[in-house]
Each structure stands twice: as structure tokens, then as C-alpha cells.
Image (cartoon, rainbow, N blue to C red):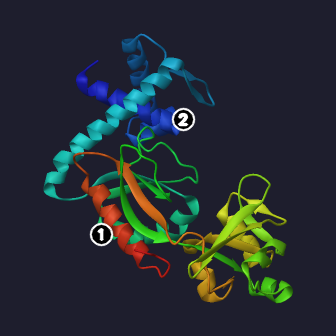
Amino acid sequence: MHQMDNELALRLFVTVVEENSVSKGGARLNVPQSSASRLLSRLEENLGTRLLQRSTRSLQLTEAGRIYFERARQIVTALDEASAAVRDLSGTPSGLLRVTAPAGFARQYIAPHLVEFSSLYPEINLGLSLQDTVEDLVSLGYDIAIRFGALPDSGLVARNLAGSTLVACASPAYLDQHGAPEQVADLAARNCLCFRSNPGKNSWSFTLGDQSQSVKVGGSMYSNNGDALMAAALSGYGIIMQPSWTVQIALDSGQLVRILPDHQHGPSSIPIHAVFAHKQHLPPKTRVFVEFMTRKIRANTWAIF
């Protein structure tokens, strides 16, 4: 197989696995399905092993295919970075930028700004993966991950975008019916909707001056999804404690009311980071996205920086 065909076959194999379709994978590279199938077969012949089990409805990686896919994706990423490094000499940010971020945050603070970002950097295409779980940035081929809270020690590089706080709040309807808590201990007898994956109680902490106090809270609902808790609170179901970036719009509109407003709720600041793999050469597409999102996020009233 010719060297150029080798690279095309490698790229094709990666895109076919990502799309779980020969035709869709080929379309991403402008390769007709018949040519794509032929290239994959020649790649398997050269390797002397089957990489994919094909059927009319799905594709399944063989054990050799799984091993080859991880290595092939790393090679394709390295080739793209090498090409980008040369193109970057012109100073024009370009290429595919893959970003993974928590779903709720991306919907509110990334997606609404993409029209402006695209007008500033028309040669950047964005792949946005919404995941509430922390994924392996490097092995999955992401350029940037948006992450909250303290970061574990790793070989990754982090840029602080801003910080947020936790806010305990409820709808005016709930507070009218049940009364606003006057002290932290009152929350133990309220319907507190907890962010958790399993039944049980949460410990909510508050600080007034130099005095800190925690209270065990629980209620008739828990969820591992902030959007669900937010919707329940807006309906008058109970009290939530959520990040300020989640509830600020509802607080500003009066749909939610902060309880114990003279107290600090939870930690003083929860950092929001843009995380990316350590590279000697940071592509302009990554740099301009981080700079752009830092400006946009810090323009919000909840942002601490």
C-alpha cells in the first residue's frame, strides 16, 4: 500500500469506528463507500488480521481492532498536530477543536456564544461533547475539557476560567407555604432536594462571620442531575443547593429566592478550569478558545476571579 494510502486508510479506520459506519466514516473524508470498504480490506490484508466484524446493521471491533484503534487515533492526532504546527506559522487559528464539558454548563455558557466565536475564527470547527462524567482527555482525543472543583495531580495543564459558589434557594411559592428558614438548623425539617446518586442525606455547610455550621438535609427527592433539581425547585417542590452559575438567572428573575442570605453557602469558591494535555506547542485554536471563553464566563455576575 502506498504511503499516502496508508495514512488515508489509518484516518478512515478511525473515522469509521467513531461513526460506527463505513459510509458515514468515509463521508467525513469524502471517500465513497465502495472505496472505503476496499481501503479497509487492504489495511486488514497488510496487517494480516481482521480489525472489524461487519454486518448490515453494525460494526464490531475485534480485539486486534481495539488495540489498533487506540494507537491509530493517537497517530492521527499527532499528524494533525504536526500539520497544525506548520499552518500556525501563518497565525490563523484553524482545524477541528474537540471540547468536552458538563452538559448544563455547555448549554448555558458555551453553546450560546458559538455564533460569535465562529465569526471571529471561521476556520475553526468545533466538536462539543456534553458529558457530566469525567472522561480521559488524552485517550479520547479531546483538546479541552471543562472541569469543576479541585483537580487531581496529572500531566494535564489547567487554566482557571473563573470560580462559582454554592447557593441554597427555593421558589417564592415554596417559601410562602412552608416559611423561609431562619437558621441553619431549620433546614433539617425542610424538603431539601439533594444532588446525589443514591438515597441518603447530604451535609450542607454555611458560614456566618467566622462561625461555620453544617446540617444534615434530605427530602422527598434526590437526583444526580442539576437540571432536574432546578426544575423541581422552580415548581415549588423544595429547597436546592446548586452552583451559582446554575441558579443565577432564576435568582435575578425572582423565580428562585436565596435562603439564609446573610450566610455564605458552602465553600467560598469552586474553581472552573479549562484542562488540556501538556504540549510544547499549544495550538492557536486551543489558545483562542480558552481566551474567548474566559472573557465570556467572567462577564457573568456569579463569576469569581
Q: In this view, does 148 lie above or below 265?
A: above
The structure residue drawn at horizontal position 70% and vertical position 64%, both measured from the top left corner, is 203
- At 45% from the left edge and 40% from the top edge, which residue is drawn? 140
Residue at far left of view: 89
| Residue 175, image x, y percentages | 79, 86
- Would you place residue 114 above or below residue 83 in this image? below
Q: How crowded is mark 2: few (under 14 residues within 10 Å), some or many (20 or more)?
A: some
Q: Nearer the viewer, residue 123 or 276?
A: 276
Q: Residue 20 carries which label?
A: 2
* Residue at the spot of label 1: 120
Q: Identify which residue, 147 or 15, lies in the foreground.
A: 147
Considering the image in quadrants, where does the N terminus appear? Answer: top left
Can you name the residue that lies furthest to the top here? 48
The kind of residue on which mark 1 rests is Leu
Pointer 1 local density, CA inside 10 Å: few below 14, some 14–19, many at least 20 = few
Amino acid bearing label 2: Asn
- 222 lies above or below 232: above
- Viewed as shown, does residue 53 lie left or right of 170? left
Which of disc 1 and disc 2 is earlier in sequence?
Answer: 2
- Cα gap from disc 2 to disc 1, whole angstroms: 33 Å
* Residue at image location 80% in from the left, 83% down from the top: 174
* Above-or-below relation of 173 to 15: below
Q: Residue 209 carries which label?
A: none
Instruction: Give the secondary structure at mark 2.
Output: loop
Q: Can residue 36 be seen in this view?
A: no
Can you name the residue that lies furthest to the front here? 210
Residue 254, position as x, y percentages in the image: 66, 88
Q: In which quarter of the image is residue 35?
A: top left
Quadrant housing the C terminus: bottom left
Element assignment for label 1 = helix
